[in-house]
Amino acid sequence: MNGSLAMVTSVVDELSGMDLASDVVICPPFPYLASVKAALSDCTIQLGGQDCSGATSGAFTGEVAAEMLRELGCGAVILGHSERRVLHAETDEQILSKVERALEQKLQVLLCVGETLEQRNAGDAEKVVARQLALVLESLSHEQLLNLVVAYEPVWAIGTGETASPEQAQAMHAFIRSLLNQRSTELAGHMRILYGGSVKPENAAELFSQPDIDGALVGGASLDAGQFSSICNA
């Protein structure tokens, strides 16, 4: 929940004129989706939502349906973000229903998983991530899972300036890849696993050099077009 219409469109206008060397999705706050879509009309950057409802319609004041995102031109949506899990007490079951609604609307799902510092220090990091992925991996078809991207975001490294070391991030990404491999080798080879947690131009290249880190879910650095483009091109 950052920025203003002027700031968001300024950043997007700058990015849309750049030659970015990777697949890019921008997920602005809901009120700015239509304006950002217009600004992206002549470039390859995709538009995404920051969340969607697990319901299709009805008396859910303040919620946004996956169909609404699709109608506004979104091609993707972030679901299960740690802030939604913590601040809104979203359960794995609720997140699954959101994933299902988004996939029905042909939205690519960026599914977030990750542990808190307390969970990591207790030695439960892998257990937490496995639980957060279990219901989705059990419930969705192979074809549905092919439209999923997993974003690993260690909660202790979001907006804190702390970053998981490349070795820590790679270890968890490899663990997630092993969970996917239990479902199918094709899925494990196909799915992109992103790292999210204080990604900056200074650490992006080293993170992306790890064999199982396929990209980034960028937070604070996405508010600056120069920083964000540097990460994209890394």
Image: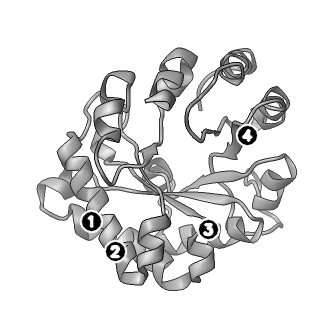
Distance in Å between CA atoms under marks 2 and 3: 18 Å
Sequence order check, earlier mark of 3 and 1? 3
| Dot label at residue 30 | 4
**Kind of residue at disc 2:** Leu
Distance in Å between CA atoms under marks 4 and 3: 18 Å
In the image, which is nearer the foreground, mark 4 or mark 3? 3
- The secondary element bearing badge 1 is classed as helix
Q: Is residue 129 visible?
A: no
Q: What colour scheme was applied to this rendering of the protein?
A: one colour
What residue is at 47 percent from the left and 25 percent from the top? 221
Residue 3 percent coordinates (x, y):
63, 21
- The secondary element bearing badge 3 is classed as helix
The residue pinned by badge 1 equals 175
In the image, which is nearer the foreground, mark 3 or mark 1? 1
Label 2: few (<14), some (14–19) or many (≥20) C-alpha neighbours in 10 Å: some
Residue 48 percent coordinates (x, y):
68, 45
Position of residue 22 in the picture relative to residue 28 (left or right): left
- The secondary element bearing badge 4 is classed as helix
Sequence order check, earlier mark of 4 and 3? 4
Q: Quadrant of residue 57?
A: bottom right
**Kind of residue at disc 4:** Phe
In the image, which is nearer the foreground, mark 2 or mark 4? 2
Are discs 1 and 2 less than 8 Å apart at CB? yes
The residue pinned by badge 3 equals 99
**Kind of residue at disc 1:** Phe
Distance in Å between CA atoms under marks 4 and 1: 33 Å
